[in-house]
Amino acid sequence: MEKALDSERRGHRFDLCPRARSSALLDSPSASTSLAGISHRTGESLPTKQPEPVPAGHEQEEEEEEEARRRRNGEKERGNGATRSLRCSPPVMLPTPGIAPRPSRTHGTIRLLIGEQETMQRVLIAILTFSLGTAGTAPKYLCTYYDIVDYLNISSHDKLHTYILPKANLKEPVEVKLDFMLMAILSVVEKLQTVSFYFVLNLEWKNPLATWNPQDFCNISQIILPLDTYWSPPIFILERVDGQSSDMNYMVLMHNGSFNSTRPLQVTLTCSLIILKFPFDTQTCNLSIASFLYPVRDLVMKTRRTASESMKDSQSFFLTDGEWKFTNLSIIERTETMDDEGFSVITYMISMERRPTLYILNLILPTCALYLLDMAVLFGPSSLEEKINFQIAIILGSSMLAVILNNSLPTSSNKPPVIVLFFLGTFLLMIMAVLDTFFLLYQHRKSRPLDKVLRRFQRHVGAELAKTPLRNQPVTHLAKEGLQHLSPPKKAEGGGQPAKGHWRPQEQNSFMPVLEKVLLYSHFFLSLFFFTLVFVKWSS
């Protein structure tokens, strides 16, 4: 039986009617042989089926049953929208020569097997029909970004869309939201009055002419496009003198027409640096972003976040830890008027504080140490000539530090920095110490000829008084008294040491130590007052 069925499958296609195949199987010699074997085992004779005319009503009933069964199982073909008909004509039993008539019981068993085969074929046909019908009748959903590009007509439209302001309503301006995040303070050049920043600027705006429904494109809600595909806000930084353009020339387009562009920028700005308290100064530089192509009736720029939120993110992502410390960020939104037109401007005020440790160690402390050394030399016990040599060497060392300072400070400013006054005052105090030492040395050398003159005058007066006659008692008393005062000291009895005289030449020059003390202490108090004033200026 199985061989008969296989031969029938190989000889007929699946699109043949099952009933026709069953009739062919019943009429084949292999099937007759199989049925003869079944009758021999069962002991029954197989009646020979005589050809009977098929009534017309029976054929109609068979067609109705088959159509109802087809509707229940959902066997509808959808390829190209056409429905295949699986209707068949009723089987016609033709007698086969040499085959004995088959009994009805065996014939019912065969029909049961053929019915199961028909059911399996119907299931297979239903599966094939469903797969072919789904592929043929489903909408064309290509889940790629090229479909969105074709839908928006980006690949074929001209560059005019990139230059025209995307306004659906001419009375409403396009709103551009900005977000600023400072990443690094690269350099601050005091002599050129410039500051270099590295920051990230995020712009967001809407284009009502570039929208699509994500459900029509497999839920694709965004696409990344080049920056020159659609219109983008032309921004201008007012304080910019140099810098590098962004390498990220792409933007994100959402399905609702919202554009998002992130641009990392490295710019050099001009900034009015106030260096009065250098190196303990705090600077504030402005970064103004504007678009002078469109007035406020066409374009308005606003900030997306507050200044505190932007500052918090900037400090969390800050990259550098150098000389300058980022301390504060303020945002000002204003309208700049030019040629009777108002333009939207957003100004970011960046405050930064200098870390003075390097300047304290390299400039201030060495200068203070040199001045303390100068004071020690001035109050020291060395000779005046040696003091002058030491003080001149200290002044030369201080001048080298002044040259280092001159290379970092600007060439012009409204007020001189405090550190310049500090170096200048220290230099002048050192020069005053040298002048004091010169004056003391001059006074000391000037007093030596005066001693010789006084000694000659003493001898001359003593000789004249000895030759003068004594006329009366008072004169005699005065002469004796004057001789006693002007006479040289006598030697002490038995000791050989000169007796204490009533007059010495050194007693006439006792103002020299007093003068030296007055000069030194006045220099000390003047230095103390100067350093206190400098400290107050730096701390105020």
Image (spheres, rainbow, N blue to C red):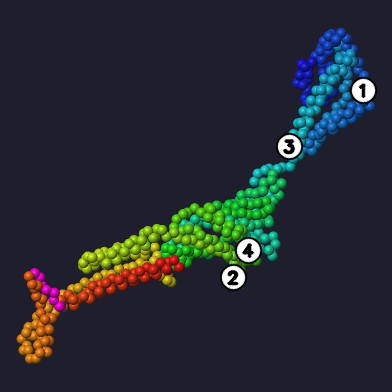
Label 1 and label 4: CA atoms lie apart by: 89 Å
Label 2 and label 4: CA atoms lie apart by: 14 Å
Secondary structure under tag 2 reads strand
Residue labelled with disc 1: 54
Amino acid, disc 1: Val
Counting residues from the start of the chain, the first of labels 4 and 3 encountered is: 3
Q: Is residue 179 above or below residue 60?
A: below
Label 2 and label 1: CA atoms lie apart by: 102 Å
Q: Tell me whether circle 1 and circle 3 mark residues in contact (CB < 8 Å).
A: no
Q: Residue at x 22, y 74 (%)?
A: 512
Q: Nearer the viewer, residue 246 or 490?
A: 490
Secondary structure under tag 1 reads loop
Residue 135 numbered mark, or none: 3
Q: Mark 4, mark 3: which one is toward the viewer?
A: 4
Secondary structure under tag 4 reads strand
Q: Position of residue 225 (x, y in %)?
A: 61, 51
Left/right placement of residue 265 relative to residue 85 reads left
- Where residue 202 sits, quadrant-wise, is bottom right
Q: Is residue 19 above or below residue 151?
A: above
Q: Tag 3: Cα neighbours inside 10 Å, few (<14), some, or many (≥20)?
A: some
Q: Which residues are magenta?
A: 495-503
Amino acid, disc 2: Thr
Residue labelled with disc 4: 300
Residue 337 numbered mark, or none: 2
Q: Position of residue 17 (x, y in %)?
A: 82, 25
Does residue 435 show up?
no
Counting residues from the start of the chain, the first of labels 2 and 4 encountered is: 4
Q: Residue 498: within the magenta?
A: yes
Q: Tell me whether circle 1 and circle 4 mark residues in contact (CB < 8 Å).
A: no
Counting residues from the start of the chain, the first of labels 2 and 1 encountered is: 1
